[in-house]
């Protein structure tokens, strides 16, 4: 592959090391890309509020595709540029059906606001059972009706006794094409988005704005939510610690995130 015109990378398990830090080597590589005039785009399942710390460690701020493609965030301006939501009617239907299909599951939702720190009490809301599984200071406990009462960019489904891989086919059969189902961890957590929303669609929006041909884009990932993106770009790279399904679709497998897999590839050109 010739030098890419755009670099895209997943964050957790790919760009970050196992301690969720940006290594010095990775930061140097990212800055080299940026300083050359080539866009470096983060494409993550994270919401905007979990992005500024990563951007600070990376030293590169710009467009970030968040929430698995549902949100486009400008990290330099701290502004949400675009979001695609799941409507309340679908939320009510799907959560009811999943409770029956996955007994013992619990729900959380992510909502989009105007920036990373705008109305934090409205961004991450869950029922109490979800909070017991995933204690998080950002999370606000709410009644079930509030969870599904307004549009959300992501529906989270958690189960204490199942893996994500076990949950996914059950959810896909129940939901059909009403929502997209994926996961970024194996620990019993599914991430559901509006139809057509995924990392490839989110990155395509950025690439179009930057006039970047997909054939000249390189992307890095490690989990099933990265697969659409790796298939869309001209050169998809799986890190060495990637899920087997991701390794199978990748054009290349680099070293693990522990050993700066992203930087190892980027240093060919920068």
Image (cartoon, helix red, strand yellow):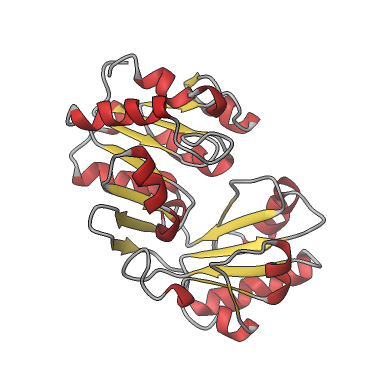
Q: Quadrant of the N terminus?
A: top left
Going 53% across and 79% down the picture, which residue do you hit? 89
The answer to whether residue 206 is above or below residue 40 is below
Q: Position of residue 107 (x, y in %)?
A: 65, 69
The answer to whether residue 89 is above or below residue 42 is below
The answer to whether residue 225 is above or below residue 76 is above
Going 59% across and 30% down the picture, which residue do you hit? 242
Give residue 130's quadrant in the image: bottom right
Q: Position of residue 165 (x, y in %)?
A: 71, 45
Nearest to the observer: residue 245 or residue 53: 53
Residue 269 visible to an observer of this rendering: yes
Nearest to the observer: residue 123 or residue 137: 137
Q: Position of residue 164 (x, y in %)?
A: 70, 49
Q: Is residue 215 left or right of residue 110?
A: left
Going 26% across and 28% down the picture, which residue do you hit? 33
Numbered disc total: 0
Residue 196 visible to an observer of this rendering: no
Give residue 144's quadrant in the image: bottom right
Q: Quadrant of the C terminus?
A: top left
């Amino acid at each position: 592959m010739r030098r890419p015109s755009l670099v895209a990378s997943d964050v957790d398990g790919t760009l970050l090391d196992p301690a969720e830090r940006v290594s010095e080597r990775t930061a140097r590589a990212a800055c080299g890309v940026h300083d050359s005039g080539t866009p470096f785009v983060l494409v993550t399942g994270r919401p905007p509020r979990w992005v500024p710390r990563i951007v600070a460690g990376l030293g590169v701020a710009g467009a970030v595709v968040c929430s698995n493609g549902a949100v486009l965030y400008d990290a330099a301006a701290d502004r949400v540029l675009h979001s695609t939501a799941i409507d309340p009617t679908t939320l009510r239907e799907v959560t009811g059906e999943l409770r029956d299909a996955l007994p013992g599951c619990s729900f959380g939702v992510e909502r989009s606001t105007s920036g990373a720190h705008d109305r934090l009490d409205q961004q991450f809301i869950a029922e109490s059972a979800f909070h017991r599984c995933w204690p998080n200071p950002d999370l606000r406990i709410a009644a079930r009706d509030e969870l599904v009462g307004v549009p959300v960019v992501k529906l989270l489904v958690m189960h204490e006794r199942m893996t994500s891989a076990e949950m996914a086919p059950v959810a896909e059969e129940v939901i059909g094409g009403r929502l997209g189902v994926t996961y970024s961890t194996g620990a019993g957590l599914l991430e559901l988005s509006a139809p057509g929303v995924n990392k490839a669609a989110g990155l395509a929006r950025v690439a179009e704005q930057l006039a970047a041909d997909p054939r000249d884009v390189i992307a890095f990932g490690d989990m099933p939510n990265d697969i659409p993106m790796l298939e869309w770009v001209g050169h998809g790279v799986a890190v060495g610690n990637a899920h087997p399904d991701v390794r199978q679709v990748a054009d290349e497998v680099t070293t693990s995130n522990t050993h700066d897999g992203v930087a190892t590839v980027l240093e060919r050109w920068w």
